[in-house]
Image: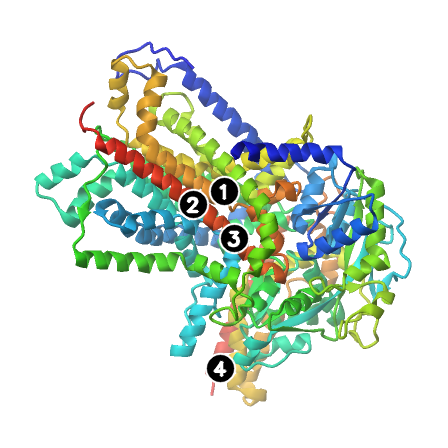
């Protein structure tokens, strides 16, 4: 890939940006068109049809706004999404602050374990949550025995907010931490020289500079929670938009267009929220020129501070990891029913899954790894095109990719069957049942996560660094490869980890596309076991295996980031 | 490592293509059930292999609908008869004539097979109440026997059920009570039961899950959920009320099956005494439809052919049920699923008022309570309206021109029902609160 740079005037690069980027942009647009837009349109176009005559109409939309149930669902979804951002921030902020500001042994623990809440295996996760926090879960049974009252953690909208916050706060933690690491130390030093310290330094200098990461994470939490189906279904809350859409789409033999109307509204609203988050960020420059100084200065904690920090961290981790502790108990327990703990412990569930787990693990690593790889490639390219070029319609690449968050997995799955089942590849059979399609579906569904992380990372890289490289004679491609991408590493890895972790437990699109057990990933294996009472322990064992795999992958990439920043931090700074 | 991983599925595909054509089965049944059947079938029919593709019922139906252009599935194998009805109407099932020796056409008034031979019941299931023994002991609750027992005030907040629009088997239970007690009485009964619910689960398996975990005390379930939970060791029991629905689980051959001989062999096997025997395994616990197999059944295994099984079973009217299928689902969701909180509050208020004024001790309060009860029980449409094609047609799929003029779009109809129901529940609660406040 050779790129010719016509212009050498750094501030006027827009018109003359090389065409290779345009080609990449068009390829990505074609990919999104093929695997996201067209399949989804094939399914949700019925939102615009009169169910009887088949004529084009907007009646379905006026029905939506005229219905009190739907209006109520809309406000409930909005309320839950907003409150979840607030609570997720309360959880993520102290963790991110402690790990990036202080020299502290707990940092690696938080950065590795902090991702785990994202990995909520389907079905078993819900059972584990109920057994711990449900109305007759461990906590409430003990509370009732000791104090004679119960706390409705898992009831109604507040229950949804509770579960969503502890489930999705890692989006903020990961993106905010990546941003904090990227802040130029000299900014902080300048502020300190001017007399700022402590909370004031954080409030006025550090946090504002980390805004791209925070906004990226918060926007993800907001849109994800607004569109999320799993949690409301698990808590049996029906008066929210996503469950309303799902229940109307998946009923056997029913063809109520309202399900597709709601899907359309979810997608439109997600794009709107994203646009609003752009408005917040518009006109501000978060880039800092100096990179590679190892981020903010890390302070030593005094012994007492250290104790306090550990207490804060253990309390938060105890809360957010509770579902996984429950899952662990479930996977080792025999019978667990209306009691604080399982009746007895056994290894037999792991024995049950042992013979099949190998295939599931291989497939999961392949699909989720491949999907995450596709995601960061597209994410980096789209981030660059959106932020650094003047290509017409570039923002739409971002909007479209993010709209995938709002597409229910079942809609995407049906769309793929409709588009690709009739296509036969030699040696493969119907294209829709080829395992590569599962990987692509996962990549499409998890692309928004990687994209937000890449965007945040690039927003912190100053344009002048590229220009400097180009002035020194580097080609565009070379300056991207040698300057921009390395400086984005933290964000890209954060994107990889979130995409990978969440793709590893995806089920709703997968279940439509898996053509046999041979191609099945772990989440599908869990589904198989969780269809019968005796499969509960085995399903939990598979869930634990999924969690361990993702945690290991996270830990390894964490080590890569640390080593990388350590290497770069060792070089003399200010040498560019 | 990664390269091997990349290659393996490809090699697997090629190997699969080279061997004998397998029988591809799309099923919603759990592994616990498909594995023993696969083993038994492959042992009995050495020239066929079974390829199980597990999808939930909805996903399975969608899959067959979307892949009809180049079908790769031989058999559809699932519980819900309505899913088969949908597939049959779409022309996705092929009629066959398997060997059905020893299998009656109906059990307890419920037809077991499609009269046109598109699908066949191979296992019967009754509906019952499953309860968690630890739960009811800890909360000092009674052992239930009949549906009415779930309406009692002390059951408030302890019952779980799925929605008929989510679970074909639940639909049959709802319809059974509507037919057995009549439209108005039947809906009233469901609402008083629903007022005691703590949840309407999104999938039918959510109910046994809730009872097994102890999240709910009682669950309205298809029998094998209760029986196999108990067999797994959970502290649960199952009772059959005297009015129960007997629901066949079905098997059918997909139209244009790639391997029709294999498919026919599998259907034959499932209906044969050997295949029926597999159903008795503790992890499966479904009731064979061949009476002779019960000779080998373990002690205490329910037998739908026995005289004392569900003595008050009704003669189930399939045509009536079919005509209002989607309407009943929608009505249940509008009145109960989506407005469970409002309903629960109204029912709790009435229960409190009745506790304050037992047995009509205060006539003024009793009048208010009666009015509140009537408001809760009211249904937005009558049975005659429900049977009217102008109404029922609102909820059917048909998108091409139809001669029946319908009364409106589904969303409009549901909106009107919703408004009426919400107003009734709110008013009922008000009246009941007034009654309770009297002294």
The image shows a total of numbered marks equal to 4
In this rendering, the label closer to the viewer, 1 or 3: 3
In this rendering, the label closer to the viewer, 2 or 3: 2
User: Which disc number belongs to residue B79?
Assistant: none
Residue B414 in sight here: no
User: Which disc number belongs to residue A552?
Assistant: 2
Task: Determine contact: label 4, label 1, CB under 8 Å.
Answer: no
Distance between the alpha carbons at the discs numbered 1 and 3: 13 Å
Task: Determine contact: label 1, label 3, CB under 8 Å.
Answer: no
Q: Residues within 10 Å of mark 1 (few under 14, many from 20)?
A: many
Secondary structure, mark 3, is: helix
User: Which disc number belongs to residue A503?
Assistant: 1
Image coloring type? rainbow
Which one is nearer the viewer's eye here, A410 or B5? B5
Where residue A463 appears, as percent x and y from the top left, is 27, 24
In this rendering, the label closer to the viewer, 2 or 1: 2
Residue B401 located left or right of residue A243: right
Residue B307 in sight here: yes
Secondary structure, mark 1, is: helix
Secondary structure, mark 4, is: helix
Q: Which residue is mark 4?
A: B436
Subunit ID for the residue under disc 3:
A
Q: Residues within 10 Å of mark 3 (few under 14, many from 20)?
A: many
Q: Residues within 10 Å of mark 4 (few under 14, many from 20)?
A: many
Which one is nearer the viewer's eye here, A269 or A289? A289
In this rendering, the label closer to the viewer, 2 or 4: 2
Residue B265 located left or right of residue A361: right
Subunit ID for the residue under disc 4:
B
Q: Earlier in the sequence, mark 2 or mark 3?
A: 3
Q: Quadrant of residue A448?
A: top left
In this rendering, the label closer to the viewer, 4 or 3: 3
């Amino acid at each position: 890939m050779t790129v010719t740079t016509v212009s050498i005037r750094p501030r006027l690069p827009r018109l003359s940006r090389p065409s290779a980027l345009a080609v990449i942009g068009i390829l990505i647009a074609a990919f999104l068109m093929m695997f996201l837009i067209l399949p989804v349109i094939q399914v949700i176009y019925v939102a615009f049809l009169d169910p009887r005559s088949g004529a084009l109409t907007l009646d379905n939309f006026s029905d939506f706004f005229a219905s009190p149930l739907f209006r109520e669902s809309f406000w409930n979804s909005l309320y839950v999404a907003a409150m979840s951002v607030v609570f997720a921030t309360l959880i993520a902020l102290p963790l991110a602050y402690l790990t990036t500001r202080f020299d502290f042994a707990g940092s690696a623990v938080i950065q590795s374990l902090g991702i785990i809440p994202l990995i909520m295996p389907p079905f078993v996760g819900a059972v584990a949550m109920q057994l711990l926090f449900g109305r007759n879960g461990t906590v409430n049974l003990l509370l009732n025995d000791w104090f004679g009252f119960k706390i409705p953690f898992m009831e109604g909208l507040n229950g949804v907010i509770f579960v969503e916050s502890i489930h999705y706060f890692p989006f903020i933690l990961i993106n905010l931490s990546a941003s904090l690491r990227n802040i130029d130390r000299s900014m902080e030093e300048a502020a300190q020289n001017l007399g700022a310290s402590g909370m004031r330094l954080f409030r006025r200098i550090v946090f504002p500079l980390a805004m791209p990461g925070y906004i990226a994470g918060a926007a993800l939490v907001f849109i994800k929670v607004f569109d999320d189906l799993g949690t409301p279904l698990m808590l049996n809350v029906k008066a929210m938009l996503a469950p309303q859409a799902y229940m109307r789409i998946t009923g056997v033999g029913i063809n109520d267009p309202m399900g597709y109307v709601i899907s359309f509204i979810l997608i439109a609203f997600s794009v709107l929220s994203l646009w609003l988050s752009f408005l917040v960020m518009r006109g501000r420059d978060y880039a800092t020129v100096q990179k590679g100084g190892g981020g903010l200065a890390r302070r030593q904690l005094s012994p007492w501070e250290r104790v306090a920090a550990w207490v804060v961290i253990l309390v938060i981790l105890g809360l957010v990891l509770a579902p996984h502790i429950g899952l662990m108990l479930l996977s080792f327990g025999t019978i667990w029913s209306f009691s604080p703990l399982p009746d007895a412990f056994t290894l037999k569930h792991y024995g049950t899954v042992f013979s099949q787990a190998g295939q599931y693990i291989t497939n999961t690593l392949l699909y989720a790894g491949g999907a995450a790889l596709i995601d960061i490639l597209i994410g980096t390219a789209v981030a660059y095109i959106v932020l650094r070029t003047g290509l017409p319609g570039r923002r739409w690449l971002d909007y479209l990719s993010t709209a995938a968050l709002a597409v229910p997995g079942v809609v995407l799955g049906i769309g793929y069957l409709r588009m690709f089942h009739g296509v036969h590849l030699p040696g493969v059979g119907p294209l829709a049942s080829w395992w590569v399609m599962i990987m692509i579906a996962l990549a499409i569904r998890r692309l928004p996560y990687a994209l937000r992380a890449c965007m945040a990372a690039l927003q912190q890289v100053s344009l002048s660094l590229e220009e400097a490289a180009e002035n020194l004679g580097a080609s565009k491609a070379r300056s991207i490869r040698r300057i921009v991408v390395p400086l984005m590493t933290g964000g890209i890895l954060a994107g990889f980890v979130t995409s990978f972790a969440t793709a590893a437990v995806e089920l709703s699109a997968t279940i439509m596309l898996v053509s046999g057990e041979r191609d099945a990933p772990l989440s599908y294996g869990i589904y198989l076991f969780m269809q019968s009472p005796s499969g509960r322990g085995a399903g939990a064992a598979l869930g634990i295996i999924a969690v361990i795999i993702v945690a290991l992958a996270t830990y390894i990439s964490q080590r890569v980031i640390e080593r990388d920043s350590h290497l770069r931090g060792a070089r003399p700074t200010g040498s560019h | 490592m990664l390269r091997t991983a990349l290659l393996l599925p490809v090699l697997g595909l090629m190997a699969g293509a080279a061997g004998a054509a397998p029988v591809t089965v799309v099923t919603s049944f759990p592994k616990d059930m498909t594995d023993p059947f696969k083993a038994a079938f492959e042992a009995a029919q050495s020239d066929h292999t079974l390829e199980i593709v597990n999808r939930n019922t909805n996903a399975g139906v969608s899959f067959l609908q979307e892949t009809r252009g180049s079908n790769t599935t031989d058999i559809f194998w699932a519980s819900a008869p309505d899913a088969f009805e949908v597939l049959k109407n779409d022309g996705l099932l092929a009629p066959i004539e398997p060997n059905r020796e020893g299998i009656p056409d109906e059990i307890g008034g419920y037809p077991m097979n499609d009269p046109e031979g598109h699908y066949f019941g191979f296992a019967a299931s009754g509906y019952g109440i499953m309860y968690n023994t630890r739960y009811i002991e800890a909360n000092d609750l009674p052992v239930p026997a009949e549906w009415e027992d779930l309406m009692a005030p002390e059951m408030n907040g302890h019952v779980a059920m799925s929605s008929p629009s989510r679970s074909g088997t639940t639909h049959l239970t709802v319809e059974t009570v509507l037919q057995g007690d009549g439209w108005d009485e039947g809906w009233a009964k469901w609402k008083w039961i629903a007022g005691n619910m703590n949840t309407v689960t999104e999938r039918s398996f959510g109910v046994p899950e809730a009872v097994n975990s102890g999240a709910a005390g009682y669950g309205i379930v298809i029998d094998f959920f209760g029986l196999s939970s108990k067999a797994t060791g959970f502290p649960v029991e199952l009772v059959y009320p005297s009015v129960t629905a007997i629901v066949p689980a079905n098997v059918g051959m997909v139209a244009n099956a790639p391997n029709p001989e294999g498919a026919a062999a599998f259907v034959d096997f499932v209906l044969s005494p050997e295949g029926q025997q597999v159903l008795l395994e503790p992890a499966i616990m479904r009731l064979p439809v061949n009476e002779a197999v019960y000779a080998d059944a373990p002690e205490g295994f329910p037998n739908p052919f026995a005289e004392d099984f569900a003595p008050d079973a009704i003669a189930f009217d399939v045509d009536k049920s079919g005509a209002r299928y989607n309407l009943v689902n929608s009505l249940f969701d509008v009145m109960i699923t989506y407005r469970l909180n409002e309903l629960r509050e109204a029912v709790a208020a009435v229960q409190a008022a009745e506790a304050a004024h037992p047995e009509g001790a205060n006539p003024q309060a009793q009048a208010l309570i009666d009015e509140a009860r009537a408001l809760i029980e009211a249904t937005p449409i009558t049975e005659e309206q429900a049977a009217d094609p102008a109404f029922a047609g609102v909820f059917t799929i048909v998108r091409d021109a139809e001669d029946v003029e319908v009364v409106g779009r589904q969303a409009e109809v549901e909106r009107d029902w919703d408004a009426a129901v919400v107003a009734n529940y709110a008013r009922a609660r008000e009246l009941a609160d007034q009654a309770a406040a009297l002294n």
